[in-house]
Image: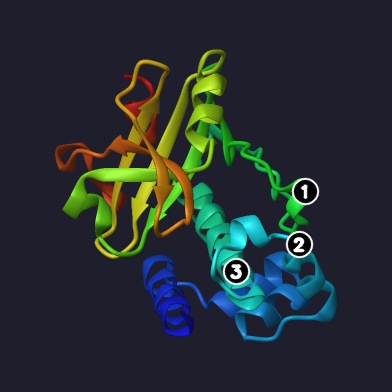
Amino acid sequence: MARHIERKIKLVENFTGLDLIVFAAEHYGPEYSNVMKGKLSTNLDNVLRSCYHNRDTRSNLQYGQDLILGWILEDFIIDRLQAPDIIFTKTGADAERKFLSGSKVTTDSDYKISLEGKQFFVELAHDFNLFWQKREVYHLRDNKLLSLIKKSEKVPTFILGISIVDRKCILKRIHKNMNKEYIEFHPPYKKPAYEIPMPAEEFYNFDDFNLRILLGK
């Protein structure tokens, strides 16, 4: 598992071009940059200890590093895609970039996007293993998909999937009639999940990705 996290750290560094320890120190503070150095304070360790359901088989340190990698990717993508007429607002439970106890972790979408007077919700997803292109499916644990579908009944809702290895991305519209399959026990998560299609022909090169055009479709 330690090698798995080390590989993800290197992939995120390559994808973003950032020094992750420096970025974490500047944006989240020294206590969190120390996590990227492999040092977990007693305070943060106690918080992450309560997240046993979301942590799965990862150690507290590995789970904390995974969370920070997610923050870095979210903030990098906001910076990459935001424009004068595309306004991102962080709406996830961890929008303040602090570790949360297990009871405070929610299924809220990561972003709200405002574009030309319209509102959209976007959930960010990452693939570090080319799984989406090989299998053309994506798995959402527990009731995450149902939460997104419920949100989509009021506001257009999407999954923005980023394939880190090959810099590909997909914007997947979520709605109540979409194709989905319930999996009672998903071995990697060791909990239930929903499977949705991610057709290879729907992927774009991330560096050519035009969010404005795709949201307007």
Q: Which residue is mark 2?
A: 50
Up the image or down, 139 lies above or below 157; here it is below
Q: Which residue is mark 3?
A: 63
* Label 2 CA crowd tier, 10 Å (few <14, some 14–19, many 20+): some
Residue at 19%, 38% in the rendered image: 199
Q: Are marks 1 and 2 in contact (CB under 8 Å)?
A: yes
Location of residue 34 in the rendering, given as x and y in whole percent from the top left corner: 70, 82
Location of residue 98 in the rendering, given as x and y in whole percent from the top left corner: 75, 59
Along the line of sight, which residue is nearer the eye, 81 or 29?
29
Residue at 43%, 66% in the rendered image: 16
Residue at 39%, 78% in the rendered image: 7
Along the line of sight, which residue is nearer the eye, 31 or 14?
31
* Label 3 CA crowd tier, 10 Å (few <14, some 14–19, many 20+): many
In the rendered view, does 146 fall on the left or right side of 64?
left
Q: Residue furthest front?
A: 184
Per the rendering, the mark at residue 103 is 1
* Label 1 CA crowd tier, 10 Å (few <14, some 14–19, many 20+): few
Up the image or down, 137 lies above or below 3; here it is above
